[in-house]
Amino acid sequence: MPRRKYITAPGDSGLQDTNETTVLLSLVAALSLEDIEHVRRQSVLTAGSPGSGSPNDEEFALQLFAEEALALESLARDMRLAQSLNTALEADTGLLEEIARSEEACRRDREYALALAAGRPLPIVQELPPIVDSGTMAVRRVLDYSSTSAASLDVAARSSTIVSISTTTSTKARVETCVICRDPIEGPVVHAPCGDFYDVGCLVDLFRAAMVDETLFPPACCRQPFEVEEVRIYLDKDLQKSVDRKTIEFGTKNRVYCHKPTCSAFIGAATPAATRVLCTTCWAYTCGHCKAAAHSLSIRCTNSEDAAVVALAEESGWKRCPGCGHLVELSIGCYHMTCRCRHQFCYLCTAPWRTCTCQQWDEERLLVVAQDRVQRQGVRAPTRGGDVGEYHRRVAREAERLRVDHNCVHRWKYVVTEGRCEGCSHYLRLFLFNCRGCHMWACARCRRNRWL
């Protein structure tokens, strides 16, 4: 019988490091296989060449021992993999908890907003459990094994988890408030370029809204755009792809869209001559010059719209934005136009703003805007017997002020009232913001994110 090599297993008096345990199990398995192989060689030398019949009891026992040793080696490998996963989870526990809490807060905020918009009773919102501010967190895996006998090497592994948490609450972190939903931010805090704070839910909502509303693009706060690369980590993959596509689309001035109304996907920039442009969404071809269905390149085409639309534009006095080519209409205000593509131009001659000598105001429109500003201040037109002179003097002062400074740099104040936002036309029931200068009413989203 060969001289056996025994290894004393650690007792229960202390916790052993997992790496040491897996190394020990691997060593036990390797030595067991070595001993089994040694016994087999000694048996062959003693009894001669093995017979061709069925294995005897000794060979059968050695085979069972070998299978148990291989199972022990497999257990050691599984333990090493489990320890690696445990280390990764331990490192990411805080981040995963913050993400889960942020998603739960967004879900509750959405339910609250839907109930508020539909006029239903508001749901009872329970406070989320606080995040444990842990200074140190040790997660130790204790792997205990015992052998039933040294000969069988029947090792059973058991694992238990002991979580030791020590907290340091000497200084409590400051809780920021989201400027959009006005709730305390319990997850990651997103810093806007202007210095405001956003939670992840409101930031994602802003980017999603900007994908379908060009007046919100690029996503900004206080007219300062977000750096997409800095906030990309908070956007899912589909939203990241949409932002990349819309950046190209909204950055193209003369755009071509698929001529099929059921598709209308953005294809690219217009071409100076007839070109067959393929839509990768519906695989239809569109002419890059006239923007209609693709035709023979030998046919001369124009990019003019339907004659009825052109005639209506001329009759109504509409102008075409030099930046993107869209038709725009001046309904109220001065001749300083700001298109949805952010291009600023003169409505009279379509030259870039402040590069022409055209007058800035139409007198009738100036008077209408001045009266609107005065009435926004709570001063109504006097009825019969009222002080008409004072009202007209206030309108005249407001008109002269508008001649000098028509582009208001909004200074907002919070007002607890209900009303309609002049930016998005949504009706708000709890509060609005009112500009101290032009007395415009806006919701929190338009005040921060829309280029008013």
Image (cartoon, rainbow, N blue to C red):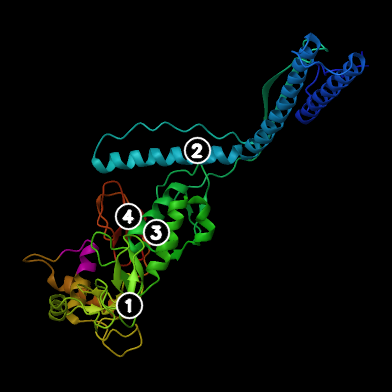
Task: Look at label 1 and name its amino acid.
Answer: Thr
Could you say which is closer to the camera, residue 308 or residue 171?
308
x and y, in percent, of residue 89 in the image: 62, 36
Say whether disc 4 or disc 3 marks the residue closer to the N-terminus. 4
Q: Which mark is residue 443?
A: 4
- The crowd level at tag 3 (other Cα within 10 Å; few <14, some 14-19, many 20+) is some
Q: Is residue 150 above or below residue 102?
A: above
x and y, in percent, of residue 83 in the image: 69, 32
- CA distance for labels 3 and 1: 42 Å
Q: Secondary structure at mark 1?
A: loop
Q: Is residue 232 above or below residue 325?
A: above
- The crowd level at tag 2 (other Cα within 10 Å; few <14, some 14-19, many 20+) is few
Q: In the image, is 42 to the left or to the right of 389?
A: right
Residue linked to disc 3: 448
Q: Which mark is residue 204?
A: none
x and y, in percent, of residue 148 in the image: 77, 10
Q: Which mark is residue 275?
A: 1
Q: Which mark is residue 100?
A: 2
Say whether disc 1 or disc 4 marks the residue closer to the N-terminus. 1
